[in-house]
Image (spheres, rainbow, N blue to C red):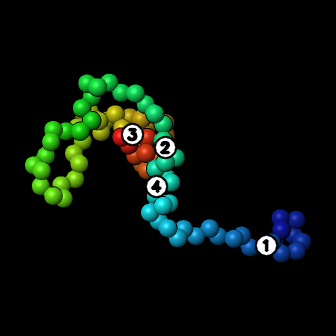
């Protein structure tokens, strides 16, 4: 019913996400902003063992920088990920 009590309200059409990978990427891209950082900040930790399947390891300073930007700009995690993506 409408707010004034007359007639029926039309049902809202729901948006359904069909391609989650593309949707995730679009959420990450919302946080795209170029920020110049000092070269002294070691973004990646020293090289790993070189074995397959090992995830990237970031330095503690890089993680703290990313989380500081997340809090500073009040971003959700995916947007913060897009902000600091190299």
- Left or right of 5? Residue 23 is left
Alpha-carbon span between mark 4 and mark 1? 32 Å
Alpha-carbon span between mark 3 and mark 1? 42 Å
Question: Which of the pair 17/8 is nearer the observer?
Answer: 17
Counting residues from the start of the chain, the first of labels 1 and 2 encountered is: 1
Residue position marked by numbered label 1 in the rendering = 10
Q: For residue 44, what is the image quadrant?
A: top left
Q: Position of residue 28 (x, y in %)?
A: 46, 50
Alpha-carbon span between mark 2 and mark 4? 10 Å
Counting residues from the start of the chain, the first of labels 3 and 2 encountered is: 2
Q: Label 4: few (<14), some or many (≥20) within 10 Å?
A: few
Location of the C terminus by quadrant is: top left
Q: Which mark's residue is nearer the viewer, 3 or 1?
A: 3
Residue 52 seen in render: yes
The kind of secondary structure element at disc 4 is: helix
Counting residues from the start of the chain, the first of labels 3 and 4 encountered is: 4
Alpha-carbon span between mark 3 and mark 2? 9 Å
Q: Where is residue 50 in the image (x, y as percent from the top left)?
A: 12, 50
The kind of secondary structure element at disc 2 is: loop
Q: Which mark's residue is nearer the viewer, 4 or 1?
A: 4
Residue position marked by numbered label 2 in the rendering = 31
Q: For residue 46, what is the image quadrant?
A: top left
- Tag shown at residue 38: none
Residue position marked by numbered label 3 in the rendering = 84
Q: Position of residue 10 (x, y in %)?
A: 79, 72
Residue position marked by numbered label 4 in the rendering = 25
Q: Where is residue 83 in the image (x, y as percent from the top left)?
A: 43, 40
Q: Which mark's residue is nearer the viewer, 2 or 4?
A: 4
In the image, residue 70 sits, relative to residue 4, either above or below, namely above
Counting residues from the start of the chain, the first of labels 4 and 1 encountered is: 1
């Amino acid at each position: 019913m409408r707010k004034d009590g007359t007639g029926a309200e039309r049902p809202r059409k729901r948006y359904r996400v069909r391609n989650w990978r593309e949707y995730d990427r679009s959420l990450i891209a919302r946080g795209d902003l170029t920020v110049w950082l000092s070269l002294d900040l070691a973004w990646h930790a020293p090289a790993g063992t070189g074995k397959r399947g090992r995830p990237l390891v970031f330095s503690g300073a890089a993680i703290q920088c990313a989380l500081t930007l997340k809090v500073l700009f009040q971003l959700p995690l995916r947007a913060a990920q897009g902000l600091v993506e190299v």
